[in-house]
């Protein structure tokens, strides 16, 4: 009985873990490309040379040799790329998806899974909207053109770097599709 006060305070003092999956692949695809009629699996196996070029363009290492990618179409016309990725937060991976236009602009990002105990403010639409329209030509520097969130600095930095890397991946490895015959 002498530990009862501590047991009652434990939920207040110790943060609750919040392992949350917000979207599966189909849900994130619908959220980012609501008008799409087809998502065609276009997973990319990257060569070492492609990974080196991605790093040279983005200043971010492409850690994965395989990148989940879908070519997105609306009524047979190519409208963009849907790419799933993961970056480390403070301790856990953050799984997110990016929608890129055919010409290399960010159309949106969605946080699919966030496992950290705090910092999930990166899911807020106001923070994610900072990426809209960004291209590889933009700096995408945290604290300059992308605002940091106090308490979520590592998540903000790594998502920002991840988006920059995906823009480079598009330029290096996702050639525009050939016109339909």
Image (spheres, rainbow, N blue to C red):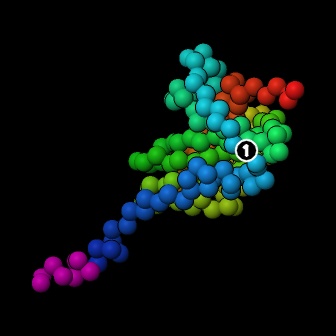
Relative to 61, residue 150 above or below: below
Q: Position of residue 51 (x, y in %)?
A: 59, 22
Q: Quadrant of the N terminus?
A: bottom left
Which residue is situated farthest in the front direction here? 181
Mark 1 = which residue?
38
Q: In the figure, is residue 23 to the left or right of 134? A: left
User: Is residue 7 covered in magenta?
Assistant: yes
> 28 or 131: which is nearer to us?
28
From the top left corner, tell me how far across and down residue 112 is, in percent.
Answer: 56, 53
Compared to residue 130, the image places residue 66 above or below, namely above
Image coordinates for residue 87, horizontal then vertical, percent: 52, 42
Residue 30, magenta (yes or no)? no
Span of residues in magenta: 1-8
Q: Residue at x 69, y 61 (%)?
A: 126
| Predominant SS of the magenta segment | helix
> Is 146 located above or below residue 66 in the figure?
below
Whether residue 107 appears in this view of the structure is yes
Q: Quadrant of residue 2?
A: bottom left
């Amino acid at each position: 009985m002498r530990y009862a006060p501590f047991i009652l305070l434990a939920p207040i003092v110790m943060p609750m873990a919040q392992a949350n999956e917000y979207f599966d692949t189909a849900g994130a695809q619908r959220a980012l490309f609501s008008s799409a009629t087809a998502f065609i699996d276009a997973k990319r196996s990257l060569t070492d040379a492609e990974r080196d070029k991605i790093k040279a363009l983005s200043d971010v290492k492409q850690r994965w040799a395989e990148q989940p990618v879908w070519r997105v179409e609306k009524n047979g016309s190519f409208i963009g790329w849907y790419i799933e990725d993961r970056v480390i937060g403070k301790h856990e991976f953050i799984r997110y998806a990016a929608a890129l236009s055919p010409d290399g602009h960010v159309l949106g990002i969605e946080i699919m899974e966030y496992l950290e105990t705090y910092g999930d403010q990166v899911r807020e639409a106001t923070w994610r909207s900072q990426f809209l329209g960004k291209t590889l030509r933009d700096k995408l520097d945290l604290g300059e053109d992308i605002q940091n969130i106090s308490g979520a600095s590592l998540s903000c930095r790594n998502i920002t770097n991840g988006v920059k890397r995906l823009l480079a991946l598009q330029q290096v490895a996702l050639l525009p599709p050939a016109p339909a015959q």
